[in-house]
Image (cartoon, rainbow, N blue to C red):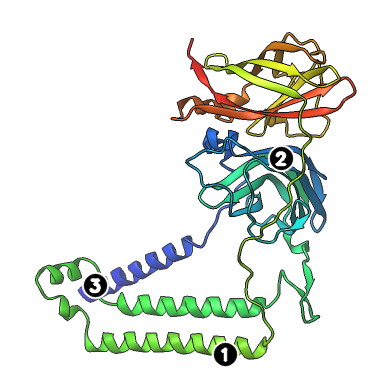
Amino acid sequence: MKTMRDRIARWSLVGVLMTLAAAVMYTPAASAHGEKSQAAFLRMRTIHWFDLNWSTDHLKVNEEMEVTGKFHVFEGWPESVDPPHVSFLNIGIPGPVFIRKESYIGGTFVPRSVRLEIGNTYTFKVVLKARRGGEWHMHTMLNVEGGGPIIGPGKWVTIDGKLSEFRNPITTLTGQTIELETYNEGNIWFWHVLWYAIGVAWMVYFCRQPVFLPRLLMTNAGRGDELVTPTDKKVGLLFGAGTILLVIFGFSSAQSKYPVTIPLQAGTLRGIKPIEMPAPTVDVKVDEATYRVPGRAMKMVLTVTNNGDRPVQLCEFNTAAVRFMNPEVCEDDTGYPEDLLADEGLTVVPNDPIAPGSTATLEVTASDAAWEVYRLADIIYDPDSRMGGMLFFYDDTGNRQLVLIDAPLIPIFM
């Protein structure tokens, strides 16, 4: 009876270990990302995304869409974050619901990391192909070595169709056309099953005897050398030798079947061309910037000097991908994500055009629930409580000017 109980216990343990091993291979589906938990200073003072355009927000499996726009590498880059000298343009999506076919920065094809310079503005384009049906939240994103993923605006995109309908044919450098989605699928299954079986065999052999408490007691009693028998050593050598032989066989087999190969490409692309932004004729000085916690509103006192030859008005304040619009001056018609668009969130007093050669003091209030929803108000608890953003001014002919601001942010709790 005792032997039977021991066997049941041993095989129960093996079952538990196999279940745990299988569980780590399971990845549940995600529908959105944790952009709201990203530090506010990281979103406000690193990469400023603007003029974004999604070619569509509803497509079918196998159809393509483009995400285009511009981003500015902010001059007030935090000292606690490594500069973007090794960066990778990416799209944040919940798993492989798209495949990325092409990526460009400044018109240059960027399949790998690039060097970006602080203070420059770049254009970008990413071409995506729909792979899996569903409704997915997707972001622009820039991965920075030493800074992590810096997330841009997110938009919900709907894909119609099934994963089984997806096709991804490519032509190799040797002229062979293959279906990348199912290429060599049988070989992949073979090697996965083989290594899984070897791992299970290893666990079964060494779990055939009591594993935990008896071994602990023997070790504490100074009898640890008895735990590994001569047979165990031979079995371990057999597993090791078999593993090495399998690796050698797999390598030589692949080398003979695919003699023409190139290594995975690494390194950092340099010389990415920024765009030349026109020098603004509007000069802005931030006299004061405060955040009123109970009202979820940021108030700025700005001294604005118009050095141009046309009257200008403040249209928009953009920070951390949230756009606060002055509805009396302009409105958005690009289909920007609604949760990131405060279309009546910017109040300017006085809201009159600033004449050429004139200087005006403006009280600008950016108020919206997005301060709390996207946890931007957390900036006031940061050791370096500074805000950064972009101001967009329009003249009476519709021409736009971009002015960057960077200033301390003082909280008000009453």
Q: Position of residue 129 (x, y in %)?
A: 77, 57
Please state which amino acid type lies under the numbered disc 1: Ser
User: Residue beneath label 1, please?
Assistant: 252
Please state which amino acid type lies under the numbered disc 3: Pro
Q: Position of residue 187 (x, y in %)?
A: 62, 80
Q: Quick check: marks 2 and 1 in contact, CB under 8 Å?
A: no
Q: Position of residue 136 (x, y in %)?
A: 69, 46
Q: Earlier in the sequence, mark 3 or mark 2?
A: 2
Q: Earlier in the sequence, mark 2 or mark 1?
A: 2
Please state which amino acid type lies under the numbered disc 2: Lys
User: Residue beneath label 2, please?
Assistant: 155
Q: Position of residue 289 (x, y in %)?
A: 57, 18
Number of the label disc, if any, that sits on residue 141: none
Front residue (pair 12, 292): 292
Whether residue 162 appears in this view of the structure is no
Cα separation, mark 3 vs mark 1, equals: 40 Å
- The image quadrant that residue 51 belongs to is top right
Number of the label disc, if any, that sits on residue 210: 3
Front residue (pair 38, 48): 48
Q: Is residue 46 left or right of residue 332?
A: left
Q: Please, which residue is most extreme toward the left here?
A: 221
